[in-house]
Amino acid sequence: MRIVEPEDFLKRPYLFSYQSAEVSGKWDIFHAHQGIEFLYIHEGEGQVIFDRQIYAAGSDTLIFFHPYQLHGTRMKAGGGNKYVRSMLLFDPAVVESALAGLPALRDFYTHLRTGRLSVQMIPRFDTDGGVARLLRRYAERLCGGAEDTETFALLVIAVLDRMRPFAEAQNTYIKNDFSGERRYAEQIMLWVEAHYAEEFQLSALADALHLSPWYVSRLFRAVTGVSITKYITARRIRQACWLLGTTSRGVQQIADMVGLSSAAYFCQIFKKATGMTPLQYKRGGAVSDDC
């Protein structure tokens, strides 16, 4: 089973692919990302699975997935069938500051980010050709170039602005209609965000939620498909990458700052997650025998 890939945002807080073509049809099933994903199907026909249900998907469809939401796609490809899609995958924080002066759109984004939209697929999303032009224009600015988070944030805002009328027309807002388990899973993620830099104690997390440790572990895995330990590790690795790329702190200091007192263990899990040691990462991937 494929689970959360912590390297999604190791080098930049977003990923953008434009009109990627699939040559073979298969389930890319039960994987999840740390960030929000927008998947736009330019051309194709097949199925999408999320929330334990299978949906038909076709050309001119926008689908979005929440952070850590398990999902997969199976589109027909080959034999005269084409599957062409664009994908935006990003850290939710990328656009939050850019939405500060746009209260209506910020409210819509909050609903989307926290899972309070009942519909995650929007068919016939590009009735006037505006989406195709928008993606093409930003692809020229973003694809293959240096990191440009501001430009990418503008692209996300433009997509959100087109999504909002569809959501309002379909009355897709859900007001506090989360399942109890999903609410708890989100509380677990919030707790991790506040405590990942500390030594992890499952009992402390369970006490904060007034639940048993066994139930907390089972619930989180059931909702997200990944263990709490893997989730915390992904969060720590992501923070470590940011610290390695933006500060001059040493490996031991960074290990301490992400809740891992042993530099040797930090190097071990960092290499397992990224394929390189912390110092190799800091040097831009240069080969080194040290940690």
Image: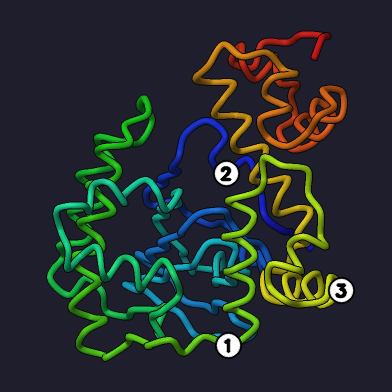
Would residue 207 be found to the left or right of residue 19 on screen?
right
Mark 2 and mark 1 lie on one chain; the one further toward the N terminus is 2
**As drawn, 131 above or below 114:** above
**As drawn, 278 above or below 182:** above
Residue 72 visible in this rendered orientation of the protein: no
- The Cα–Cα distance between marks 1 and 3, rounded to whole angstroms, is 19 Å
Give coordinates of residue 25: x percent, y percent. 62, 66
Residue 87 visible in this rendered orientation of the protein: yes
Within 10 Å of disc 1 (Cα), the crowding (few <14, some 14-19, many 20+) is few
Residue 117: name its quadrant. Answer: bottom left
Would residue 170 be found to the left or right of residue 243 on screen?
left
* Residue nearest the observer in this picture, 83 or 221: 221
Residue behind mark 2: 8
Query: Which of the labelled discs sits on residue 214, or is there none?
Result: 3
Residue behind mark 1: 179
The residue positioned 73% from the left and 62% from the top of the image is 205
**As drawn, 122 above or below 15:** below
Q: Amino acid at mark 3?
A: Trp
